[in-house]
Image (spheres, rainbow, N blue to C red):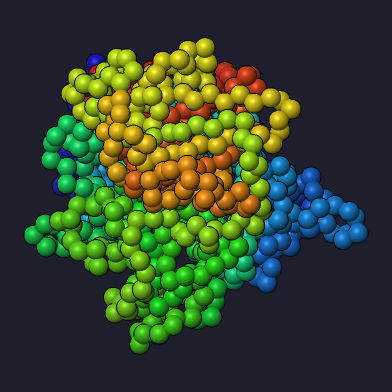
Amino acid sequence: MLLNGCLSYFTKVLNLLTLKVWDSPSAGSLQHPILKTPLAPSPAREDYPIFPPPNGPLIPGEGITCSYPTLTEYEPCSDRNDRKCWLRPKNPDSGLPTYNITTNYEDIFPEGVLRRYTLNASDLAIAPDGTQKPFAKVFDKTYPGPWITACWGDTIEIEVTNSLECNGTTVHWHGLRQWNSVEMDGVNAITQCPIAPGKTMTYRFKALQYGSTWYHSHYSLQYADGLAGPMTIFGPSSDDYDTAVDPILMTDWGHRSAFEDWSYSQHGGKYDGLDSILLNGIGQYKTNTGLQVESLPRYNTTFQTGVRYLLRLINTSIDTTFIFSIDHHNVTMISSDFVPIHPYSNSSVLVGIGQRYHVIVEASPSNPTADGNYWIRTTPATGCNGLNKASGPVKELEKTGIVRYNPYSTALPNSDRNDFDEKCSDETYSSLKPILQWTVKNDALQTDDIVAQFRNVSTIEPKGPYTVPNPDKSLRWQLHKQPLWLDFSKPTVLNLDNTGAPELAVITHNTPVSAESAWIELAILGMPKKESDGHRGVAAAHPIHLHGHDFALLAQSEEPYTDELANKLIKRDNPPRRDVALLPKGGFLIIAFKADNPGTWLMHCHIAFHASSGLALQLLENVERMKINPDSQRMMADTTTKCSCQYPLKPFSSHEYL
């Protein structure tokens, strides 16, 4: 019965292959999800802060209203000459604190309102670059998914319905700490069972941080097929600007399902890489014969001379680090991921997979063109590029958008590319200086060494037999013990007494209740210290993402790990801080995070194919102190129904890689 349903779905998708171009919002615009409640309460009297966010949507009337009903002694204070301020006491002599860029947002936040949204995940054949992707999966029939917005301190509630025909799903709210709400992190087999087809789950969490991020399916490779969208929590900024541009999502894109490509890459089939680059869901594609496929107009945005624009940059790629630039303009970085930083300027910014930057661009080109048109470029970094070489030269692929000073112009720019390095890396370590300072004590309660490496799980048995099935005898990635292998029907958060199996790749951290400032340090190595125990060292760069925490980046090196080098590089006084950092090819990272958020947290490579090959581990942090309220427990019980089937059309196995 289930197999027949999937075969029926396959037939319906084949019938869609004759479509030319999918229906999409106009170039540069983003849709908003359906709200179950009004945008903001209608107060009897406005004796508390209620105001439109200073960096809301470009289209008037589409945004939310920030509202703080309990803060009757406060007033909004953000303006174009002081974006560092958010809320201040009406009476400066009241002794009340100001909520601004220096507020310790991990412990202190203004109490906002409840925001309710709905999202619906479904199958849809789309052609964002003019070529059909028949097995795409999207939220609310659009790609990227709707822009979810909230204000600093709000509670966000999102009802997710799974209308996919042949997949379970979950939704992860990337970078949000989920402080004391681990069950809302949206990771299948770790924090929940997948939402079965036809079922609904409601996520609810606090917006303690502010800035921009993205939400995406965390069920296997679904986000690579389109289940992703932007999210912004409005709050203060570390530098001033006049107005803002809606989020800009950059991604690599394949025409086949990522499930199909992953299978080819693992089992010796023909996989040449991804086909094109999209900017806010719009791309250009040429066939391998050089024929330009009919597609949507490129992403466009209009600048007015002298205006300072806030841009929200988000890399939602499968396998590519991008260098974002606008010809003849500099960009000023003011936040990395959810961490406000001291501003610095450059001709471009490196945005790794899963990373986000808020940048300010002043509309004053260094060398004005006659027609006022300038290329926006998303340049694939050399060595972190998952694109098919047959897709065309980088110098053409990278031209993904246009800044126009004349909104009526339709001409393509003839502007010149800025000068920047194209190598695979993160932004310069010393440039990322957080506003809110951390000092990481040299007395971590627990330290661990972790190695990202290939293993042939069918033949190599370094410390006893592998417990992971591998009938195809393919290579797998791993971080700890074995490639992470999960039972979707037994999420870790509900099975804490059964976490000893090596394929669960568990590291346990328990700290005393009295150790409120305890730190956990992890050294993540790109190559094993010694080629032993059947390890196969494969040098590759990996964007490493930690759930449940921002981490301090104590050291980041392209050189192989040695104790001497690590001790020389480690920075403990206000090191860079974020939730995704690049593990350089053959190098190492040393990260530290506060053991202040009990839960079952995932750490993984954000190259989708690597994570799905097992390059991930679980951190069990003070799980005996987890707080899951009764409503959440009942909701989790409702989602324990196993998913019915999985692409490609075959019965679903309850065990799978991430």
Residue extending farthest to the top is 497
Q: In this rendering, does residue 356 appear at all?
A: yes
Choose top left, top right, bottom left or bottom right for residue 52.
bottom right
Image point 33% across, 63% down: which residue?
422
In this orientation, which residue lies closer to the viewer: 479 or 22?
A: 479
Say above or below: 451 vs 238: above
| Residue pictured at 46% horizontal, 73% vertical | 330
Front position in the image: 383 or 200: 383
For residue 176, above or below residue 507: below
Relative horizontal placement of residue 450, taking residue 54 as reference (left or right)? left
Quadrant position of the C terminus in the picture: top left
Front residue (pair 260, 11): 260
- Image quadrant where residue 90 sits: bottom right
Give x and y (percent) for residue 341: 59, 59
The structure residue drawn at horizontal position 61% and vertical position 28%, both measured from the top left corner, is 598
**Front position in the image: 463 or 511:** 463
Left or right: residue 555 versus residue 631 is: left
Rendering coords of residue 85 (x, y %): 71, 61
- Please tell me which residue is depicted at 14% across the width and 34% down the height of the picture: 268
Quarter of the picture holding the N terminus: top left
Q: Residue furthest right?
A: 93
Q: Which quadrant holds residue 181?
A: top right
Q: Is residue 202 above or below residue 328?
A: above
Residue 581 in percent (x, y) is at 46, 47
x%, y% of residue 59? 51, 62
